[in-house]
Image (tube, rainbow, N blue to C red):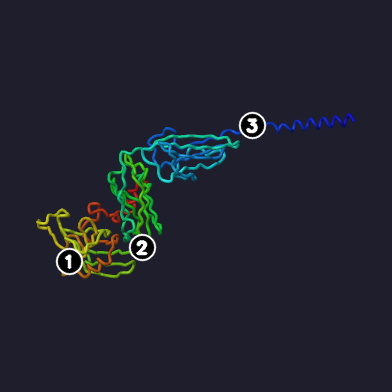
């Protein structure tokens, strides 16, 4: 009996040792909250990602208020690759960082307070707050863009973005100019000077596609105190492929609709004193009637080579005065001799046909002229005369 009681006692003592797991558990460590924007930060971009990372807990309420204490509407979403990381290493518990996104962009020159709360396993709260001020630009600017929204253009029309003043940080601006098209291309931006950047593929645009430029420039630092004023989106369509070849050496112009040759016209190009420029020219405007005035191109009307002549069916090819137009006075030379001041002369009926066939963005490739190649000296669209490797070198994102 004693032995049996001893066994019972021992069993009871053993049970007390195992019961140590019933002691109060240690408290969970507080969650930590890290904010990408620092408390007291100034000159912050109004589009900076307000990223929040939590370690050892779950993110709870996030609020943003303006300097008057009014709440700013917004919502949480997953952090993207564009967001600046809040720490060098990810949180140990693997919780993904999140970004608070306002319904409308934050304003320039305004104070905001970001408050984020997290809870640990014991539902204990941790709160972090950062008050910051967005930058006050010295000036803001919105560029002009061509083509205009809703236009249909030919396969040679580049996207052109013009700034009111030189851009100091070209890479920052270019990285926020996003071009998409229904048929993808290998297009690249190239800066023609400090205030103008163009986009084109290595070859002419594919025919009959849709193209969109999203110029997401609000909150972008252009450098030297200039910031983007607003975002713009422009969508346009590329129509049929119209590429004509004007050969000054044979005095003929072949007109193609897609891959089909539809017209072969006798023509007269620029004569020895005023040779036409070689290279791909882009149609920029069409004038049913126009006064050709040599003074607009630097030659006085009353000089020996001056002129002021009304013409019909004028299709502009460059800003140096080159057009395809009706020239009934040179019909005898068309197909035989180059006698114009740089234009492509056609008979009136042929010029009328070409005028009705053309649209801005169509291409006229001039070749066989004794003149130089189209260049910056000749106007704003000489893009296709630039070799592709040189064009690519003009990007600020090399």
First in residue order: circle 3 vs circle 2 = 3
* Callout in the foreground (3, 1): 3
Query: Residue 316: which quarter of the image?
Result: bottom left
Height in image: 126 above or below 228?
above
Which residue was labeled with disc 2?
207
Q: Residues within 10 Å of mark 2 (few under 14, many from 20)?
A: some
Q: Identify the element where label 3 is drawn.
A: loop
The numbered mark at residue 26 is 3
> Which is nearer the eye, 362 or 246?
362
Question: 22 left or right of 146?
Answer: right
Asked whether residue 398 appears in the rendered view, the answer is no
Helix, strand or loop at disc 1? loop
Point out which mark residue 258 bears.
none
Residue 16 horizontal/vertical position (percent): 76, 31
Picture coordinates of residue 326 (x, y %)?
A: 19, 66
* Relative to 5, 86 lies left or right: left
The numbered mark, 3 or 1, whose residue comes first in the sequence reads 3
Q: Mark 1 sits on what residue?
A: 327
- The percent position of residue 184, horizontal first and vertical second, equals 40, 57
Instruction: Give neighbour class at mark 3: few <14, some 14-19, many 20+ (Cα, 10 Å).
Output: few
| 137 in relation to 203, above or below | above
Q: Which residue does the image show at 37% across and 63% down from the upper left?
A: 208
* Disc 3 to disc 2: CB gap under 8 Å: no
């Amino acid at each position: 009996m004693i032995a049996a009681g001893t066994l019972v006692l021992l069993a009871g003592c053993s049970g007390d040792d195992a019961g140590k797991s019933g002691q109060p558990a240690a408290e969970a460590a507080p969650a930590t909250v890290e904010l990408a924007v620092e408390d007291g930060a100034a000159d912050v971009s109004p589009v900076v990602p307000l990223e929040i990372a939590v370690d050892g807990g779950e993110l709870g309420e996030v609020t943003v208020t303006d300097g008057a204490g009014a709440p700013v509407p917004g919502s949480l979403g997953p952090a993207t690759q564009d967001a600046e990381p809040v720490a060098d290493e990810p949180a140990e518990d693997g919780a993904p960082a999140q970004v608070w996104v306002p319904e409308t962009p934050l304003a320039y020159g305004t104070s905001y307070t970001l408050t984020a709360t997290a809870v640990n396993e014991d539902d204990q709260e941790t709160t972090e707050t950062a008050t910051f001020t967005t930058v006050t630009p010295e000036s803001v600017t919105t560029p002009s863009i061509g083509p205009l929204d809703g236009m249909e253009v030919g396969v040679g029309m580049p996207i052109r973005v013009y700034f009111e003043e030189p851009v100091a940080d070209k890479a920052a601006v270019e990285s926020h100019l996003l071009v998409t098209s229904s048929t993808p291309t290998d297009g690249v931006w190239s800066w023609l000077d400090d205030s103008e950047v163009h986009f084109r593929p290595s070859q002419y645009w594919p025919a009959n596609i849709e193209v969109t430029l999203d110029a997401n420039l609000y909150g972008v630092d252009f450098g030297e105190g200039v910031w983007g004023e607003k975002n713009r989106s422009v969508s346009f369509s590329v129509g049929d492929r119209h590429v004509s070849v004007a050969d000054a050496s044979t005095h003929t112009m072949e007109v193609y609709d897609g891959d089909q040759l539809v017209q072969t016209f006798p023509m007269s190009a620029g004569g020895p004193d005023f040779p036409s420029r070689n290279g791909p020219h882009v149609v920029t405007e069409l004038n049913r009637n126009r006064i050709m005035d040599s003074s607009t191109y630097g030659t006085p009307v009353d000089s020996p080579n001056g002129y002021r002549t009304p013409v019909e069916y004028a299709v502009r090819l460059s800003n140096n005065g080159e057009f395809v137009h009706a020239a009934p006075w040179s019909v005898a030379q068309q197909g035989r001799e180059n006698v114009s001041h740089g234009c492509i002369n056609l008979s009136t009926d042929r010029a009328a046909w070409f005028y009705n066939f053309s649209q801005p963005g169509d291409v006229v490739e001039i070749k066989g002229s004794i003149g130089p190649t189209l260049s910056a000296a000749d106007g704003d669209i000489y893009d296709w005369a630039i070799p592709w490797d040189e064009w690519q070198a003009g990007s600020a994102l090399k």
